[in-house]
Amino acid sequence: MPTPRRNFLKSAASALPVATLQSLLAQSAPPLVPALHPVAAGQDRFGPPRTLGMSTFTFKVATSDTAGNLFVIEHRGLQPGKGPALHLHYSQEEWFYVMEGEVAFVVGDQHLSLRTGESVLAPRRVPHTFSAVASPAHMLIAFTPAGKMEQYFIDGAAEPAASQTEAFMNRYDMKWIGPSPFWKS
């Protein structure tokens, strides 16, 4: 016949894996966001719009809002013949959604042109770039995970001329491949 002590030990031993699992799950779960962060149309999450010289952009979802899982910017006024250098991200997928206008993309070996309401994903480690086709374009761009992209845009806005150079881009876990095929001399 089991003794009270033996029953207690069996119960405690069977509960230990559950308690340990719950503890591990609690430690690995991202923290809950304590507050909503609405961002009005045309506004930046933290202040005035920024520029890298090719357009203006506003932060819509900050890296800290998602424990580093996502960073979203709104990209306005992208001009034909302008856009980023041909580059790749070592650790981020980059998603583009055209909100207005037409944007030409190079993603790997593919050349495509997207219009309002269309989107494309540039997978990590795949070279890509883009430019407006005929008139200024407007896009949403998301990076996942966020990595160093938010800091790239902050530092790039402080040094727009340097932001498209190999040395600058490489500091933010990107690889500069070369000039954009869309750049006009």
Image (spheres, rainbow, N blue to C red):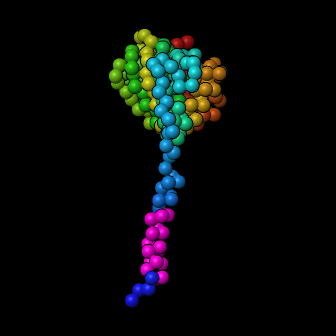
In this picture, which residue range is highlighted in magenta?
5-20
Q: Work out whether residue 114 or residue 182 is closer to the camera in this orientation and state it.
A: 114
Which quadrant of the figure contains the C terminus? top right
Give left or right: position of 4 versus 170: left
Note whether 39 is above or below 8 in the view shown: above
Which quadrant of the figure contains the N terminus? bottom left
Q: Position of residue 71 (x, y in %)?
A: 50, 33
Q: Residue at x 56, y 31 (%)?
A: 150
Give left or right: position of 99 versus 170: left
Q: Position of residue 17 (x, y in %)?
A: 46, 67
Note whether 60 is above or below 146 in the view shown: above
Note whether 72 is above or below 99 in the view shown: below
Quadrant position of residue 111: top left
Quadrant position of residue 114: top left
Q: Is residue 76 visible?
A: yes
Magenta: predominant secondary structure element? helix
